[in-house]
Image: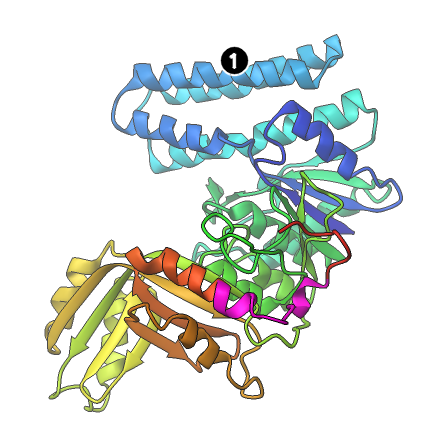
Amino acid sequence: MKVLKFGGTSVGSAQRMREVAELIHAPEQRQLVVLSAMSGTTNTLVAIAQLLYSGDLAAATARIEIMRQDYHMVARELLPDEAVAAAALKHLDTIFRALFDLTRQPLSAAGERVILAQGELLSTYLFHQYVTGILGREAVLLPALDFMRLDQDDEPDAAYIQEHLVATLALHTHQQLFVTQGYICRNTQGHIDNLKRGGSDYSASLIGAAVRAEEIQIWTDIDGLHNNDPRIVSNTYPLRELSFDEAAELAYFGAKILHPSSVLPARLHGIPVRLLNTMQPEAPGTLISSKTGEEAIKAVAAKDGITAINVKSSRMLLAHGFLRSLFEIFERYRTSIDMITTSEVAVSLTIDDATRLPQILEELRRFGSVEVDTQQTIICLVGNLGQVNHGAAHRAFEALQNIPLRMISYGGSPNNISILVNSADKVQALQALNAGLFHRPNSVPNSLAKKEGELAF
């Protein structure tokens, strides 16, 4: 079985849904299709929830009605058969009636999660109706709420997911095509919950791991994971192969095409993940597997919104247990540390969530003087950075010779060099690295592995 996930842009209109249906037309192969909400839907649902929290019921009701009308238009365009369309419109109105009902009472956190779940329920329903009612293919709509569940730590319960999904599939041994929702799940109380933004990738990986899929495909609107950010750097190119570790580093440090957690379940079971382009399905995309190439530095990613904290204490730093005490502060406030460097008298570290920064700083000042730098960016260089690849760091720092560097972390991972810069210097730094690392004279990256005319620069 293959698991194929299609993002919001891929199912963002009736025409896009028709194109996805053609991409999955492989009757000889078992496929489980995971869909996101149609592009823009989740943002609209978030806005509706915010209006309800603020007490603006009239505005929330109006947004729901506009959304209902938009979905009616999509359904009529997607489902030309009158009987199929009529049944679909009736079902859509049932969903929107439930949304209208939520405006009649104060919104709770549980109610908000119910609102946010509707996007995936809408997209999968319409897509399933098109495949079965219009194309006449057999397909089973599997409710993700029947098998996707979080544990007590709000992490996916892999054992529960596997048990219930495998049992469900066993009821349909002769079926080849299944459709389900990404992103949504239930929590330990049985209430509707979700895997947070970008969670459809995570859903696909968890599902692929549960069924021991042959391959997990993530279909988006870009032809693979690029060596740099194509939005701000010219002459980037898609990487043909990455290891799980390399892909995880890039996703965590800013590569938007992939959810940071999505490769972990696949990696655990050695299931390859392929990133493909719905708009250009013939492109080879990026294959993520256990293999790694020879390139010292394959790609660069940047993560904004970083806060740097420097703790200076000549009295405390060398004391036994000092670092443990420091880390315990961040653990108490559930704040993760991205980078850390130490000297004889100071510790510098970074966080990407400043929600509890005032409380953290108050406790840190017990150890010494504390300095804080906001609006920082971590630039992550990813590749095969083992000791056998001499000179990789030198090339990177040579490219960055005109950029002020706040912190450097190298050696903690054989796949990552992390560099902290002021966010105002990010664009210049990414462009300098692209020129210095990937476009050197007489050098063609092995990861391109391109055929004649395959890529346009």
Q: Who's the residue at 37% across and 64% down the image? A: 378
Q: Is residue 131 left or right of residue 311?
A: right
Query: Residue furthest toward the front?
Result: 441
Q: Is residue 352 left or right of residue 222?
A: left
Q: Can the viewer see residue 193?
A: yes
Q: Can the viewer see residue 127?
A: no
Instruction: Identify the residue under disc 1.
Output: 69
Residue 208 found in image quarter: bottom right
Indicate whether residue 436 is drawn in magenta: yes
Question: How dense is the environment of label 1, judged by Cα within 10 Å: few (below 14), some, or many (20 and up)?
Answer: few
Query: Residue furthest toward the right?
Result: 28
How does the figure colour the protein chain or chains? rainbow
- Decide: is 163 above or below 219: below
- Decide: is 105 above or below 206: above
- Decide: is 291 above or below 83: below
Residue 247 found in image quarter: bottom right
Q: Is residue 438 left or right of residue 279?
A: left
Give the percent coordinates (x, y) of residue 224.
63, 52
Q: Who's the residue at 43% across and 60% down the image? A: 430
Q: Who's the residue at 32% across and 30% down the image? A: 50
- Decide: is 125 above or below 227: above
Please provide the residue range marked out in magenta: 435-449
Give the percent coordinates (x, y) of residue 204.
63, 50
Give the percent coordinates (x, y) of residue 13.
61, 26
Give the percent coordinates (x, y) of residue 325.
23, 79
Indicate whether residue 91 is drawn in magenta: no
The local secondary structure at tag 1 comes to helix
Camera-side residue of 242 and 182: 242
Q: Who's the residue at 56% across and 18% down the image? A: 71
**At label 1, which amino acid type do we have?**
Gln
